[in-house]
Amino acid sequence: MKGKKWYAALAALATAAAALMASSACLWFFYQPKEPDCLNK
């Protein structure tokens, strides 16, 4: 029974970590830095 609780806790932590990484990836995607002027030539 202890093994199942361990796997459930591990699955919950992995799910939370995946959700944090996915949300930060979305924030990185929306961040668009200013294009350098030298590329406009």
Image (cartoon, rainbow, N blue to C red):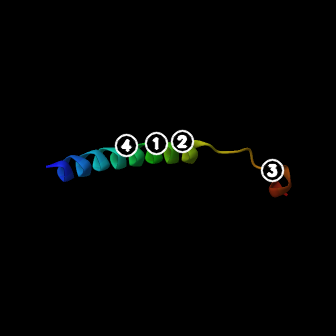
Q: Nearer the viewer, mark 1 or mark 3?
A: 1
Q: Nearer the viewer, mark 1 or mark 4?
A: 4
10 left or right, relative to 27: left
The three-letter amino acid code for the residue at tag 1 is: Ser
> Helix, strand, or loop for circle 2?
helix
Q: Does the residue at mark 4 contact the one at mark 2 (Cβ under 8 Å)? A: no
The three-letter amino acid code for the residue at tag 4 is: Ala
> Helix, strand, or loop for circle 1?
helix
Neighbourhood count class around disc 1 (C-alpha, 10 Å): few under 14, some 14–19, many 20 upward: few
Q: Nearer the viewer, mark 4 or mark 2?
A: 4
Residue 30, position as x, y percentages in the image: 56, 43
- Which residue is under mark 3? 36
Q: Does the residue at mark 1 contact the one at mark 4 (Cβ under 8 Å)? A: no
Q: Residue at x 47, y 47 (%)?
A: 21
The residues tagged by marks 3 and 2 sit, at their Cα atoms, a distance apart of 21 Å
In terms of image quadrants, where is residue 38?
A: bottom right
- Which residue is under mark 2? 27
The residues tagged by marks 1 and 3 sit, at their Cα atoms, a distance apart of 28 Å
Residue 28, position as x, y percentages in the image: 57, 46
Q: Nearer the viewer, mark 4 or mark 3?
A: 4
- Which residue is under mark 4? 16
6 left or right, relative to 40: left
Neighbourhood count class around disc 4 (C-alpha, 10 Å): few under 14, some 14–19, many 20 upward: few
Residue 35, position as x, y percentages in the image: 75, 49
- Which residue is under mark 1? 23
